[in-house]
């Protein structure tokens, strides 16, 4: 958005924001339901909160697909092809177009990951766990302690 503002492509930046934001709502709601399920029903894989989290994740996948893989490519195409009818492009304009296409490639990659998770949930019927760490490290690591001693 910042680059679009600097180069005068405000409308493109706003449209990109409007298209990329709606999928975040069901994703965050699904995460919230997952955390509630872990807090209220520890150890149970089947509960109403987990079912709600799965349905919200499915809603997220559909919204992601529609907004980011159907509607967003039109923005890329419009900025690349249609914009040429109204003004010639220089370095800044081509930079914006290149960044739009890079973001499109990332969206395709992310959707492949989402489809993999959806396949695991819907077809295989397995619960999916977040492999990233939720806990922050409170105690300093041995390496950090050794570096601190060396510095002193």
Image: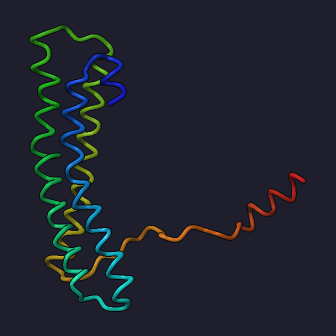
Relative to 3, say whether 36 is above or below: below
Asked where in the image residue 150 lies, by quadrant, the reply is bottom right
Q: Indicate how the structure is coloured in the image.
A: rainbow
The residue closer to the viewer here, 110 or 31, is 31
- Looking at the image, the residue that sits furthest to the right is 152
State the residue lying farthest toward the bottom: 43
Q: Residue at x 25, y 29 (%)?
A: 13
Q: Residue at x 25, y 32 (%)?
A: 100
Depth check: 81 or 72 in front?
72
Q: Is residue 31 above or below residue 47?
A: above
The x and y percentages for residue 139 are 69, 70
Q: Residue 17 occupies which quadrant of the picture?
A: top left
64 or 122: which is nearer to us? 64
Q: How many marks?
A: 0
The C terminus lies in quadrant = bottom right
Please give left or right for residue 105 compared with residue 139 in the image.
Answer: left
Please provide percent x and percent y for residue 52: 20, 76
Residue 82 at what x, y percent from top left?
Answer: 9, 20
Which residue sits at x=19%, y=60%? 60
Percent x, y for residue 3?
35, 25
Q: For the N terminus, which image quadrant? A: top left
The residue furthest top is 88
Which residue is found at the position 23% from the left and 73% from the top?
Answer: 53
């Amino acid at each position: 958005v910042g680059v679009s503002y600097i180069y005068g492509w405000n409308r493109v930046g706003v449209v990109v924001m409007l298209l990329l934001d709606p999928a975040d709502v069901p994703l965050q709601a699904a995460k919230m339901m997952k955390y509630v399920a872990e807090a209220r029903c520890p150890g149970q894989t089947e509960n109403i909160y987990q079912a709600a989290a799965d349905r919200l994740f499915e809603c997220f996948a559909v919204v992601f697909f529609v907004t980011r893989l159907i509607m967003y490519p039109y923005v890329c195409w419009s900025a690349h092809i249609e914009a040429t009818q109204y003004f010639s492009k220089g370095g800044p304009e081509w930079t914006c177009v290149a960044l739009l296409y890079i973001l499109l490639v990332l969206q395709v990659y992310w959707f492949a990951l989402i489809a993999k998770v959806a396949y695991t949930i819907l077809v295989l019927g397995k619960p999916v766990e977040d492999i990233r760490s939720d806990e922050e490290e409170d105690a300093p690591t041995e390496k950090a302690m050794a570096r601190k001693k060396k510095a002193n």
